[in-house]
Amino acid sequence: MAAKRAGTGMRKFGHGLGLIGVSVVAGVVAAGIALPAVAAAGLGAQSAADDFQSLPDDFKTPALSQASTILDAQGGTIATVYDRDRTVVPGDQISPLVKTALVDIEDNRYYEHGAIDLKGVLRAVDKNASSGTTAQGASTLTQQYVKNVFVDEAGDDPVKVQEAQRQTVGRKIQELKYAIKVEETLSKDQILTNYLNITFFGEKAYGIEAASRRYFGVHAKDLTLPQAAMLAGLVQSPSGYDPAVKPAAAKDRRDTVLRKMAEYGHITKEQAEQAIATPLGLNIQAPQQGCILAKQGEGFFCDYVRKVVLTDPAFGKSAAERLALWKRGGLQIHTTLDPKAQAALNDSVTSHVNAGDKAATAMSIVQPGTGRILAMGQSRPYGVEDKPDQTQINYNVPKAMGGGLGFPTGSTFKPIVAAAALESGLSPSQSYTTDYSIPWPAMKDCSGGKFPSAGQVHNDSPTLTGQFDMKSAMAQSVNTYFAKLEADTGLCGVAQMTNKLGITEQAGGEKLQVVPSMTLGSNDLTPLAMAGVYAAFAAHGTYCTPTAIGSVTGPDGKQLAVPQANCSAVMSANTADTVTAMLKGVVEDGTGKAAGLTGRDSAGKTGTTNGSLQVWFVGYTPEMAGATVVSDTDNPKSLDGQRIGGKTVGQAFGGTLAGPIWRDAMDGALNGTPAGTFTSVPLP
């Protein structure tokens, strides 16, 4: 049905236009196509020809904006994202029917002429002159393609789009000059393919592949004759012939295309009549794009990936370069997200805390030794802010990456102090005799600023008194012990260890507060940051920056540079393994017993902030490190007495509220994974 066009005689004339017919053709354009009254305005053939010759001959086929796909570590689709819904396809993936239909309705002599159709120009001049209007144009498909390039490059700027669409002598001459260049460098078939990939078909669909999917739910290569004719008819006026809004107009236009195809002998009259007798047969597919459509609570991770592309210098030196990359699209973004771990995490956070609860929980899981983010989610679904129980604030990450202001970490910070102490030469046997409440020891920060002994630090229970070594103090989370340990280690040493573990500022972007209360977790941090810290303990002292992206393939199939984890040893293996041995005791006999895993080594630390405003559990196995926080997110109030997950919380503790969330998520994430073991370190 779709016959291939032949003939190149007129095309040779078009290619020679710049040599033999510039003044004549430009004058015809000026006099008859753009403005019938142009002569009265004093714009003659010579000025048009001068404009033609002065235009730069540097037209380049643009890289088209198209959809990008964000994939999990197993290759499953998390989301399709785009600035414009377009999937560029090669010519052999486009039905010949739609190519033929487009040529027949828009430029039936396309394969017989070059950049300009002189017969069409003269015909239009004659008709427009007799009518005194611009009732008929003479733009070839190649000229239309050039115009579409200008419109596409204008983006979403209405002023630039209007300028690109202006029907002026200058614009027509520019289109003609560049159309000649296009015809010199591309074959007719390639121009036609480019045209079909760039054109807007209405309903937010750019290019023939997106249009085929939008209106009929099929690929461009599988279009039937009636479908192909309808889409070819749309290019003249996507809104005027929008089949979703104006089906009668769309059918009339489709039928006109079919009659033209029969008139030019590319289908039979019977085929045209049969197709005309069919309804439009629409199967409208709503645009499926954006992180909001991600499943298994992956929307927050999806949005985090977007933020990484827009902010990390690996994707461009400037913000403008990175934004251009994202908008241009065509990327295959292979992320680190493990679908099994994500499903387990999502099941746990949503089963323990309801979306409508005042409190919310958030959790991140990181792979020790690589920094790969395996899972990320929270109990409140990803969605628009004006819907109850939804949010686009990712409680797992800092404000600059789409998150909030973070949360005080409570006693989950104490292992950092222990690591700094061990690195300074103190022994895990270091013991202090302490009371329930003591004055804060005097300390100095890294600049020599003094913190005199003032105020009181106390334990969570009056029974926590007497002599403690590092292991027992960690297991029972003795605040007064760690205040003394911090003082003997040196506040600056604790701050330096914190920095080595990737924490250089608070979640809201504020400067890290290097103060005595650091040991009690007074800085506002995120689950992702804390998961990264504990992953370093699991990896024998190697800290890796948490990373979300494994690889990115561009629209040309080439690999792009991606952010690196930059793994490095930040403490000795013995220090890390000693901390692990102490944290293993926390889940075996200490405050984190309710979070312990069955049948595999695990270690972790509980955290409860002042007034029970937040509770934490951060822990790890040899294979995974995870951090969980529960907090009232809007105007934090005590979790004590709140209804959380359908149950009333008596007194909130990290071990009993956050711990089970961590345990269930890790159990599911590690299901089927052989259990590793920690390095054994004898403790006093």
Image (cartoon, rainbow, N blue to C red):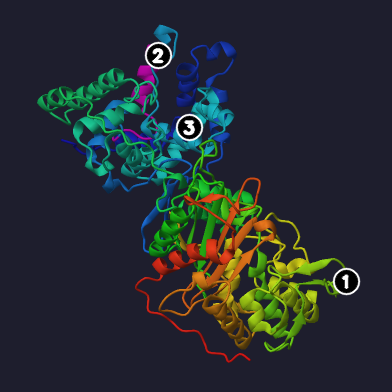
Kindly state the secondary structure of the residue where label 1 is placed. loop
Dividing the image into 4 quarters, which one contains the C terminus? bottom right
x then y, percent, for residue 605: 59, 72
Residue shown at the point (38%, 45%) measured from the top left = 87
Count the labels in the image.
3
Q: Extreme left residue here?
A: 270
Amino acid type, callout 1: Ser
In the picture, the disc for residue 135 is: 2
Residue shown at the point (16%, 26%) measured from the top left = 275
Q: Which residue has dot 3 on it?
A: 175
Dividing the image into 4 quarters, which one contains the N terminus? top left
Amino acid type, callout 3: Glu
In the picture, the disc for residue 453 is: 1
Q: Tell me how far mark 1 sits from mark 2, CA to CA.
A: 90 Å
Position of residue 430 relative to residue 240, above or below, is below
**Crowdedness near tag 1: few (<14), some (14–19) or many (≥20) residues, C-alpha within 10 Å:** few
The answer to whether residue 499 shows anywhere in this view is yes
**Crowdedness near tag 3: few (<14), some (14–19) or many (≥20) residues, C-alpha within 10 Å:** many
Q: Which of 474 and 30 is in front in this view?
A: 474
Q: Is residue 243 magenta?
A: no
Amino acid type, callout 2: Ala
Tell me where the magenta segment starts and ends, as one range. Answer: 111-127
Of marks 3 and 1, which one's residue comes earlier in the chain? 3
Q: Is residue 368 left or right of residue 313?
A: left
Residue shown at the point (41%, 7%) measured from the top left = 131
Q: Does the magenta stretch include residue 123?
A: yes
Front: mark 3 or 1: 1
Kindly state the secondary structure of the residue where label 2 is placed. loop
